[in-house]
Amino acid sequence: MRRIFGYLKPYRLRMALGLAIKFTGTIVELAIPWILSYMIDHVIPLRDAGRIYLWGGVMFLCAVVALLFNITANRMASLVSRNATEQIRNDLFGRVLYLSNRQIDGFTLPSLISRLTTDTYNVHQMLGMMQRLGVRAPIMFLGGILITLTLDPVLTLVMLAVMPVIVGILYFVSRIGVPMFTSLQHKIDQYVRVVREDVSGIRIIKALSKEDYERNKFCAQNRDAAAQEEKAGMVMSLLSPGVNMCLNTGTVLVILAGAVRVNKGLVQPGVLIAFLSYVTLILNAIIFVSRMLSVYSRASASARRITQVLDSPMDLEPVALEEAVRLWPENGSKSADRPGGEASPYIEFDHVTFSYHKKEPNLRDVSFAVGRGETLGILGATGSGKSTVIQLLQRFYDVDDGAVRIGGRDVRTYPAGELHRLFGVVFQNDFITRDTIRENIRFGRELTEEQIREAAACAQAEPFIREKAEGFDTVVAVKGADLSGGQKQRLLISRALAAHPSILILDDSMSALDYRTDAALRGQLREHFSDTTSVIVAQRISSVLHADRILVLEEGGVAGYGTHEELMQSCEIYQDIWQIQTGVTKGQEVM
């Protein structure tokens, strides 16, 4: 929670002013019962209408001042909590963007979503309530007790007799409630995960008529979250009745003791009336504290989850070249300064082994090299490690053993921005935003109109864009729902080509293109991007047939590497893929 309170520092002066206004308003409010007591015992018996009106006007003025000051202070508190929460959300979202893939896997996407939404909302509620009631409740409580002590110490002690029981209830509830709310947030994470999956796959759900199945799965997660919330609510529900019972008991005892003391002439009627008013204020202060405790319990669990993300260490930081040579000596002879020009491999995997969960390796001893301007095709069954190669190349994860180099330089020595600017990438499950076609291609980069149009033409996207009524200004639906599969892939390839990258990665991103468009695209890449090194992950052998090198993966290992002709002679798996997809056996092949 200390980290969250740190976001209030820029608003210290505003908070101080707001708290001063709240303090003044509360003090003025505390004066009203005393004025009433004074009027009953000392002004009304004089039967002086002028003095009665005067003190009545003072009471009315105090009520107006207390009202205006409390409203002003509450508005200032809301403004501070809103601005602080806005900054928390911005910092949290910014930190999420820079989390490594391994860290995202650890937190999980549904959990990060709920931390950005539900948890920040809980913190917002707490920050606002702490400012509104954090001053008012203590002042009402302590101020009320001090004034009642001046009015009648005996009645004050009677009222305070129930306080130890109230403190015990507050401690018990807070001790149990905070862990339960932490568990509740984990249940909400699971709830968000199901919602996210179902919304993303709504078309498949409808196509397979699995609405009832998914609804039952959702209901199960919803039931778990509701059950956990019910448990936490039951614990917190003990707070209000328990405190109210103690407060009501205290009030009854005060009334009984007060009646006895009035009857004996030890207390004046006006003092008893004022005392009961102060008892009401003190009881309201305790109720406010119990409400704050409930909100704080929930916010404390949320703040802990937010801080976990904000304080997560920066992962995959670049390693200095000298340090890289010390840690991985094989980089010494393959640094970025090594001569060799085009003869040197531009992309190189050097005996790479990697595992996502550090159990079974997802890649085992993978080695290959691709020269600048060459094309590498990657083939393999689902789960063979094709996408893992792509992720390691961009250093979304660090290898467990071996090295990945670009331009003779270990990717671990590149700053993230410098490394990622080398790439133009289209992933399997890439996304399209609800924006114009132009902005989807530009994607926040400083690109000219000419670059955007040239990229669209090269990616074979220009024909369908031209058919749109507003051309490049056409707004596409979320995730490109109003585009066909081929149109989406061509739009995404346009985005990847627009900045003329040094390395182009197409991760199974041409599967929806017809053969003519596929061939035209490959022709444009050869003509206009001859200096770009291309890595094409594909299921169709025709998409990589003319690649300079083809890497065949099987269960995380290299099953074959070479040209098409070489693989047709040496790689049985490649021969099987060729025969299955073309119907032509090795002996029948005509090149």
Image (spheres, rainbow, N blue to C red):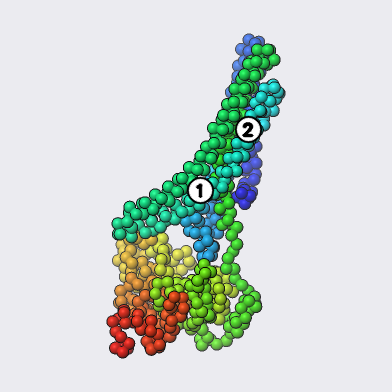
Left or right? Give the position of 46 relative to 429: right
Q: Secondary structure at mark 2?
A: helix
Query: Image height check: is 292 above or below 489?
Result: above
For image coordinates 43% across by 51% down, the residue present is: 221
**Image quarter of residue 418:** bottom right
Disc number at residue 369?
none
Question: Which kind of residue does numbered mark 1 sit on?
Answer: Leu
Alpha carbon of mark 1 to alpha carbon of mark 2: how far?
28 Å
| Residue count near mark 2 (Cα–Cα under 10 Å), binned few <14, some 14–19, many ≥20 | few
**Image quarter of residue 323:** bottom right
Question: Which kind of residue does numbered mark 2 sit on?
Answer: Val
Is any atom of residue 265 visible in this view? yes
| Residue count near mark 1 (Cα–Cα under 10 Å), binned few <14, some 14–19, many ≥20 | many
Disc number at residue 184?
1
Is any atom of residue 375 visible in this view? no
x and y, in percent, of residue 105 in the image: 50, 62
For image coordinates 59% across by 42% down, the residue present is: 174
Q: Name the N-terminal-most of marks 1 and 2.
A: 2
Camera-side residue: 548 or 465? 548
- Which-is-in-front pick, marks 1 and 2? 2
For image coordinates 59% across by 26% down, the residue present is: 249
Camera-side residue: 172 or 82? 172
For image coordinates 41% across by 63% down, the residue present is: 431
Q: How many marks?
A: 2
Query: Image height check: is 44 above or below 253?
Result: above
Query: Image height check: is 408 above or below 297?
Result: below
Which residue lies most toward the front here? 359
Q: Quadrant of the C terminus?
A: bottom left
Please name the residue that numbered disc 2 is placed on: 165
x and y, in percent, of residue 79 in the image: 56, 43
**Image quarter of residue 584:** bottom left
